[in-house]
Amino acid sequence: MTVIEKNLLIEKMASPTAYLWRMATNYCLNRLKKQGRSLAEFPVEHADERQPDEELNLKRVFLQRLFSQVSQRTRELAWYRWVDLLTWEETALASGLSVSGVRKHLEKFTQTARRFKEHV
């Protein structure tokens, strides 16, 4: 794709911000992959400082195990929606799915998380 084609693509987008978020996220994920690291290794930036380390570690282990059970696409959608706080439409645009597709993926993820939590 030429520079001109890319510029036309960006001009046609409803939300270029979503495209930039996707680019930045993919760039960071690719760098982590090259380094042999995963997002689960990084501390949660917005964690409550008053939480005991044991409770925070349990949450990290829970999330690591939960995310290991779902596809990369689902992890990406969850990240866009609940960490980057993109709207449904921005998440759909960033992922190349329809809003309905994003909702279906994340509803399935939420159900998986609830079932997983019951068994822990």
Image: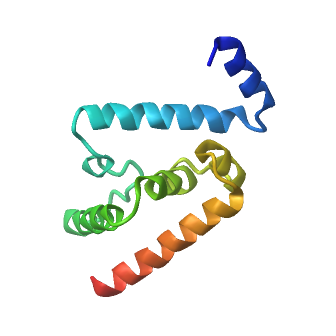
**Location of residue 119 (image quadrant):** bottom left
Image: 101 above or below 26: below
Q: Quadrant location of residue 7?
A: top right
Residue in the image at 64% along x and 61% along y: 101
Residue 61 against residue 111 in the figure, above or below: above
Which residue is situated farthest in the top direction here? Answer: 3
Q: Nearer the viewer, residue 78 or 60?
A: 78
Tell me which residue sits at (33%, 31%) in the image: 31
The residue at 24%/65% (across/down) is: 61
Label total for image: 0
Position in image of residue 47 (x %, y %): 37, 56
Rendered position, 75 above or below 116: above
Residue 69: x and y, percent?
A: 33, 67
- Residue at 52% across / 73% down in the picture? 108
Q: Is residue 6 left or right of residue 108?
A: right
Display coloring:
rainbow
Q: Is residue 92 left or right of residue 78?
A: right
Image coordinates of residue 55 in percent, x first then y, are 25, 69
For the N terminus, the image quarter is: top right
Q: Position of residue 54 (x, y in %)?
A: 19, 67
Quadrant (top left/top right/bottom left/bottom right) for the C terminus: bottom left
Side of 58 where 22 appears, left or right: right
- Name the residue furthest front: 1
Up-down: is 114 above or below 57?
A: below
Quarter of the view holding residue 70: bottom left
